[in-house]
Amino acid sequence: MGFLIKFLLFFTIVYLAMKAFVRFLTGKRNTQAPPRQQQQTYTRQPETQDDRIIEYQKKNFEKSDVEDVDFVEIKSKDGEK
């Protein structure tokens, strides 16, 4: 039982050491990308009043509730289809 624990501990230490060594050689410090680029494109302001109106209408359309509609078939008096 003690041999198994020593083997797993040794394997974990070797794995972490190799991973740290590779990161040191490649110069990677933080693996996450900075979120600044996403925020800059998302917080873009419309340039003209027409653009602001269109953005406002898009937001209202996206927030509006969907309503069920009953369709009525309209038949002509002539009996034509």
Image (cartoon, grey):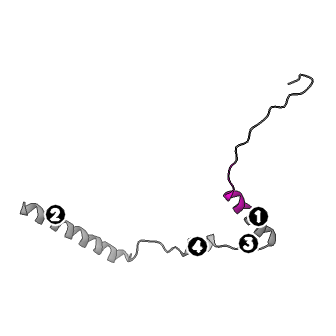
Per the image, is 64 magenta?
A: yes
Give yes or no for contact between labels 3 and 2 (Cβ–Cβ under 8 Å). no
Give the class, few, some or many, for how many residues have Cα within 10 Å of label 3's Cα (few <14, many ≥20): few
Quadrant of the image occupied by residue 56: bottom right
Question: How busy is the neighbourhood of tag 1: few (under 14 within 10 Å), some, or many (20 plus)?
Answer: few
Closest to the camera, between mark 2 and mark 4, is 4
Q: CA distance from mark 3 to mark 2?
A: 58 Å
Q: Disc 3 vs disc 1: Cβ atoms closer than 8 Å? A: yes
Label 4 crowd bin: few (<14), some (14–19), many (20+), radius 10 Å: few
Amino acid under label 1?
Ile
Q: Is residue 25 above or below residue 65?
A: below
Marks 4 and 3, the one that precedes in the sequence: 4
Measure the C-alpha gap from mark 3 to mark 1. 9 Å
| Residue beneath disc 4 | 39
Residue positioned 23% across, 67% down in the render: 15
* Place of residue 44 in the rendered image (x, y in percent of width and height, measured from the top left): 67, 73
Q: CA distance from mark 2 to mark 4?
A: 43 Å
Mark 3 vs 1, N-terminal side: 3
Q: In percent of the image, x 55 and y 75: which residue is there? A: 36
Is the Cβ of the residue at disc 2 closer than 8 Å to that at disc 4? no
Give the residue type at disc 4. Gln
Residue contact between numbered discs 4 and 3, judged by CB atoms under 8 Å: no
Magenta residues, as a range?
57-66
Q: Which mark is residue 46?
A: 3
Residue at label 2?
8
Q: Earlier in the sequence, mark 2 or mark 4?
A: 2
